[in-house]
Amino acid sequence: MPLPDFHVSEPFTLGIELEMQVVNPPGYDLSQDSSMLIDAVKNKITAGEVKHDITESMLELATDVCRDINQAAGQFSAMQKVVLQAAADHHLEICGGGTHPFQKWQRQEVCDNERYQRTLENFGYLIQQATVFGQHVHVGCASGDDAIYLLHGLSRFVPHFIALSAASPYMQGTDTRFASSRPNIFSAFPDNGPMAVGQ
């Protein structure tokens, strides 16, 4: 897989994405209602964005590019309040976590989004199995070299990041024997793995 172009941004700005589960009480199975919730909140979000992720049981809360963690936390707090109220109004609930413990991938509807529909066409059922939930933190860097330098600096914290990601021991109603089964889902994709390093 070729390396994507590096996008320069103001150093140490950040953007955060959080993938959330849409669940249907009282059984708390995943609900296929993210489109309805997105429609319910789209005119009430003043900063950041609530959008689709892979399947209709997923919501992604994404901040704008923020100057510091306090700004990002404020955006998340405001988005969360709106989303939780919309979910309650529709008798749904929202939760996080690496995987849903007993959902069945066969029931997951891929959202009507060009990128995810293209992935469904290319990889079939693998995208339905990728109904997993994570958090992504994007940090601004002035150059590709600075980004590599930052990654090297953060590498000593890898054990901490691994511990924080240990949120998915169950998958499809089975104890996976992993503290984090989420990364294993993506290893099945043919385009997964280390990127090729160019000249």
Image: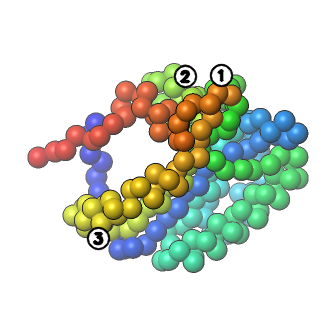
Q: Position of residue 35 (x, y in %)?
A: 71, 43
Q: Position of residue 119 (x, y in %)?
A: 48, 30
Residue, disc 2: 125
Helix, strand or loop status at disc 3: loop
Density class for disc 1 (Cα within 10 Å; few <14, some 14-19, many ≥20) is few
| Mark 3 or mark 1, whichever is nearer to me | 1
Tell me which amino acid carries mark 3.
Answer: Ala
Mark 1 vs 2, N-terminal side: 1
Gap in angstroms between the C-alphas marked 3 and 1: 43 Å
Badge 1 vs badge 2, beta-carbon distance below 8 Å:
yes
Please indicate, yes or no, whether residue 56 appears anywhere in the rendered image: no
Density class for disc 3 (Cα within 10 Å; few <14, some 14-19, many ≥20) is some
Q: Position of residue 156 (x, y in %)?
A: 33, 62
Q: Nearer the viewer, residue 73 or 65?
A: 73
Residue at the location (62% across, 56% down)? 61
Tell me which amino acid carries mark 2.
Answer: Tyr
Using residue 174 as the reference point, say whether residue 155 is left or right of it. left
Residue at the location (87% across, 47% down)? 90
Tell me which amino acid carries mark 1.
Answer: Gln
Please indicate, yes or no, whether residue 142 appears anywhere in the rendered image: yes
Q: Quadrant of residue 170?
A: top right
Residue, disc 1: 106
Residue at the location (67% across, 38% down)? 100
Gap in angstroms between the C-alphas marked 3 and 2: 39 Å
Using residue 8 as the reference point, say whether residue 83 is left or right of it. right
Q: Nearer the viewer, residue 114 or 63?
A: 63
Q: Which mark is residue 27?
A: none
Residue, disc 3: 142
Gap in angstroms between the C-alphas marked 1 and 2: 8 Å
